[in-house]
Image (cartoon, helix red, strand yellow):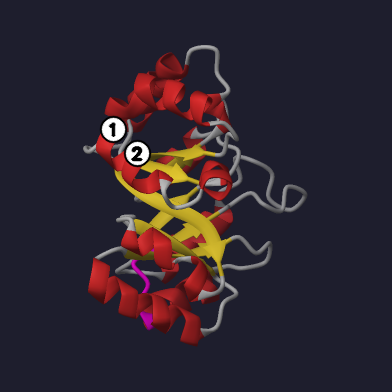
């Protein structure tokens, strides 16, 4: 499993502070809200400072032109809204051929499940990003049944799981061994981000 940090803070000062303390424990840096605020120019800044980490440009776009700068600036992953047309995905695949970035089908929709994951794999996506607990009434945090359905449905595509994970609730997800586990506020809002990240790493090792 890889550990991805979701940088959904809104200030660069906080982002640099957190990443300086944790980057050597992180596999993928996700530029979420901070990327929206700062623009794709932030990608080479982060890559230069933390060359050992991959960059996920997570803006969940449904049109290619809004993602072009991310490709040009060297994002390793670029997310596309799963509700986008196949044509939009094909446009992103052409950019993948040119720049080498992986394409992530971001399944943010509340009712999306195995069928959507299978379609993403069929058309050629490299990864699906799945929020197993977005419907908190039907699937409270810790209920991983939908995640298991997703994993059973696909064979040759990375599965990335995210959404409100903390040290207290993440263990059922780790037991499913997704390819990527995404943690955001639990790390960057912590009083000691490095200590929390180390604990996540220790828990992940139990399932390797």
Query: What segment is highlighted magenta in the picture?
Result: 123-127
Q: Residue at x 60, y 74 (%)?
A: 83
The reply to whether discs 2 and 1 touch (Cβ–Cβ < 8 Å) is yes
Give me the C-alpha separation between circle 2 and circle 1.
5 Å
Answer yes or no: is residue 108 visible: yes
The crowding category of the residue bearing disc 1, from other C-alpha atoms within 10 Å (few below 14, some 14 to 19, many at least 20), is few
Q: Residue at x 50, y 50 (%)?
A: 39
Q: Horizontal placement of 61 versus 98: left or right?
A: right
Q: Horizontal placement of 170 versus 76: left or right?
A: right
Q: Which residue is mark 2?
A: 46
Tell me the quadrant of the picture where the C terminus can be found: top left
Front residue of this view, candidates 194 and 137: 194
Image height check: is 12 above or below 90? above
Q: Horizontal placement of 30 versus 163: left or right?
A: left
Q: Quadrant of residue 98?
A: bottom left
Let me know if residue 40 is in the magenta part.
no
Answer yes or no: is residue 178 visible: no
Point out which mark residue 180 bears: none
Q: Which residue is mark 1?
A: 49
Image height check: is 98 above or below 185? below
| Residue 187 pos. (x, y %) | 50, 26
Q: Secondary structure at mark 2?
A: helix
| Residue 116 pos. (x, y %) | 53, 74
| Residue 74 pos. (x, y %) | 30, 56
Q: Horizontal placement of 109 versus 90: left or right?
A: right
- Main secondary structure type of the part rendered in magenta: loop
Residue most toward the bottom? 87
């Amino acid at each position: 499993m890889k550990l991805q940090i979701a940088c959904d803070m809104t200030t660069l000062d906080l982002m640099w502070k957190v990443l300086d303390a944790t980057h050597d424990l992180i596999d993928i840096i996700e530029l979420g809200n901070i990327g929206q605020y700062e623009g794709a120019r932030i990608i080479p800044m982060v890559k230069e400072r933390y060359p050992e980490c991959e960059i996920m440009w997570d803006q969940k776009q449904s049109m290619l032109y809004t993602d072009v700068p991310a490709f040009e600036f060297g994002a390793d992953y670029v997310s596309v809204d799963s509700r986008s047309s196949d044509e939009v995905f094909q446009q992103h695949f052409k950019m993948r051929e040119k720049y080498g970035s992986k394409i992530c089908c971001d399944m943010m929709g509340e009712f999306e499940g195995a069928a959507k994951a299978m379609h993403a794999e069929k058309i050629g996506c490299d990864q699906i990003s799945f929020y197993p607990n977005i419907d908190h009434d039907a699937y409270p945090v810790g209920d991983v049944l939908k995640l298991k359905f997703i994993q059973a449905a696909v064979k040759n595509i990375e599965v990335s799981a995210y959404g409100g994970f903390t040290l207290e609730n993440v263990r059922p997800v780790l037991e499913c061994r997704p390819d990527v586990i995404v943690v955001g506020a639990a790390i960057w809002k912590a009083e000691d981000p490095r200590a929390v990240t180390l604990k996540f790493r220790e828990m992940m090792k139990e399932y390797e």
